[in-house]
């Protein structure tokens, strides 16, 4: 178990803190990273329950992702926020990030931290990539992450609750609390 956790942490550090920053020299590369990240998470959140014949999990993932996407589209229509690259006025909130975090939260809630931790790492990378690609401001990404997380928590029932990751925010910052039931 300790070796497994150590391996997960090593993969996380290598994936998030080295490779993308070394290779992502252009906005186009960051754009590609964000596209691959969100599509990978959406696919995983929808395919994993189907392969496990967890039809309730598939329904919950569909609701979580659908709600996040729907609220994002409505918010984009209501909020006139120009993108940093001046492409259009659909900057707020980040749809890629909302979909990534709704998928990651659904995976975490349904299948535990072993699936959720790497999913959150990819979702975080997706959000960072959206900002680095100049598609969104940092607050667009934070709003998308919050929206997706809330959607995932609301629509997804826990499958195994022995280890819990709980996001928190206060006036000085935020983080992730880890708790384990013995």
Image (tube, grey):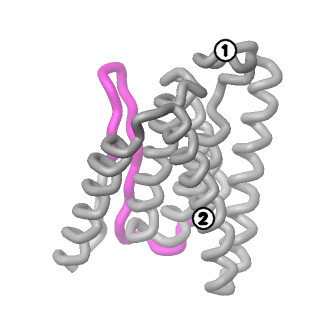
Looking at the rendering, in which quadrant would you find the N terminus?
bottom left
Position of 73 relative to 42 (above/below)? above
Residue 156 horizontal side relative to residue 37, left or right: right
Seen at 54% across and 64% down, the residue is 107
How crowded is the residue under tag 1: few (<14 C-alpha within 10 Å), some, or many (20+)?
A: few
- Marks 1/2: CA distance? 40 Å
Magenta span has 176? yes
Instruction: State how many labels appear.
Output: 2
Label number found at residue 157: 2
How crowded is the residue under tag 2: few (<14 C-alpha within 10 Å), some, or many (20+)?
A: some
**Residue 162 occupies which quadrant of the picture?**
bottom left
The x, y position of residue 163, in whole percent, is 35, 66
Position of 142 relative to 180 (above/below)? above
Q: Check disc 2 and report its element: helix, strand or loop.
A: loop
Which of the two labelled residues, at mark 1 and mark 2, occupies the earlier sequence position? Answer: 1
Seen at 30% across and 21% down, the residue is 172
Can residue 153 be seen from the camera position used here?
no
- The segment highlighted magenta reads 158-177
Query: Which residue does the numbered mark 1 point to in the structure image?
Result: 86
Seen at 51% across and 44% down, the residue is 126
Can residue 54 be seen from the camera position used here?
yes
The x, y position of residue 33, in whole percent, is 51, 47
């Amino acid at each position: 178990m300790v070796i497994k956790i150590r391996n997960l942490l090593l993969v996380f550090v290598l994936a998030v803190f080295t490779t993308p920053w070394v290779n992502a020299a252009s906005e186009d590369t960051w754009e590609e990273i964000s596209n691959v990240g969100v599509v990978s998470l959406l696919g995983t959140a929808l395919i994993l329950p189907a392969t496990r014949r967890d039809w309730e999990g598939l329904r919950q993932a569909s609701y979580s992702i659908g709600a996040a996407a729907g609220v994002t589209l409505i918010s984009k229509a209501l909020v006139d926020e120009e993108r940093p690259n001046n492409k259009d006025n659909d900057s707020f909130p980040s749809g890629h990030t909302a979909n990534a975090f709704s998928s990651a939260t659904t995976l975490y809630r349904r299948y535990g931290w072993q699936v959720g931790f790497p999913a959150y790492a990819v979702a975080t990378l997706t959000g960072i990539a959206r900002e680095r690609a100049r598609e969104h401001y940092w607050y667009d990404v934070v709003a998308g992450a919050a929206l997706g997380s809330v959607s995932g928590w609301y629509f997804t029932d826990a499958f195994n609750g022995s280890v819990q990751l709980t996001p928190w925010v206060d006036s000085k910052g935020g983080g992730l609390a880890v708790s384990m039931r013995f």
